[in-house]
Amino acid sequence: VQLQASGGGLVQAGGSLRLSCAASERTFSNYGVGWFRQAPGKEREFVASISASDNIIHHADSVRGRFTISRDNAKNTVYLLMNRLKPEDTAVYYCAADGRVKTYSTWYKNRNEYDYWGQGTQVTVSS
């Protein structure tokens, strides 16, 4: 599966962006998808995820209420709508996908549970 992340850019604090993660796989609906981000000098961290068949959604505490993950299986695309952006949201955002059966409930936070990664898209929020 090849993933193409796009939609990043420079935005002022309080603004919005929508990231897209387009997949090459026609059965993308069978894959759980996560968004992660990595700021300079920091580890890559979980942002949001959406499961495969039942569309169970999770958001990190830091973005809950501001960011929303969704998917359009007809377009093989997962979105991350980011509202009320803050300077601390500045990072490279990566989408990731995996089609394997998961054996524990918090798998979505673990970047090692994702086999496929996009190239990342830069989000910069100015104050």
Image (spheres, rainbow, N blue to C red):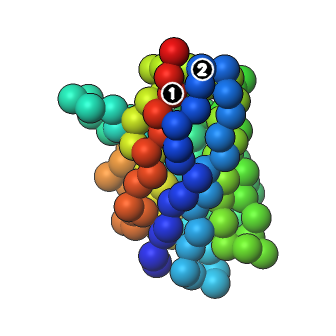
Amino acid at circle 2: Ala
For badge 1, the amino acid type reads: Val
Badge 1, how many Cα within 10 Å: few under 14, some, many 20+?
many
Q: Secondary structure at mark 1?
A: strand
Q: Is residue 46 visible?
A: no
Q: Quadrant of residue 45?
A: top left
Compared to residue 8, the image places residue 41 above or below, namely above
Q: Is residue 99 visible?
A: yes
Q: Relative to 84, is 88 on the left or the right?
A: left
Disc on the earlier residue, 1 or 2:
2
In percent of width and height, residue 43 lies at 27, 34
Which residue is nearer to you in this view: 12 or 5?
12
Q: Which residue is mark 2?
A: 13
Q: Is residue 100 left or right of residue 71?
A: left
The residue at 32%/52% (across/down) is 112
In depth, the one of 68 and 106 nearer the eye is 68
In the figure, is residue 118 to the left or right of 81? left
Q: Is residue 8 above or below residue 66?
A: below
Count of number-bearing discs: 2
Question: Of residues 21 and 47, which is closer to you in this image?
Answer: 21
Residue 70 horizontal/vertical position (percent): 72, 51
What residue is rendered at 54% in x and 58% in y?
6
Outermost residue on the top side: it is 127
> Rounded to the nearest whole Å, what is the CA distance between mark 1 and mark 2?
6 Å
Label 1 close to label 2 by CB (< 8 Å): yes
Q: Is residue 20 left or right of residue 47?
A: right
Q: Residue sitting at 51 percent across and 60 percent down?
A: 5
Residue 25 % position (x, y): 57, 81
Q: Which residue is mark 1?
A: 125
Of 123 and 99, which appears nearest the observer? Answer: 123
Q: Quadrant of residue 40?
A: top left
Secondary structure found at label 2? loop
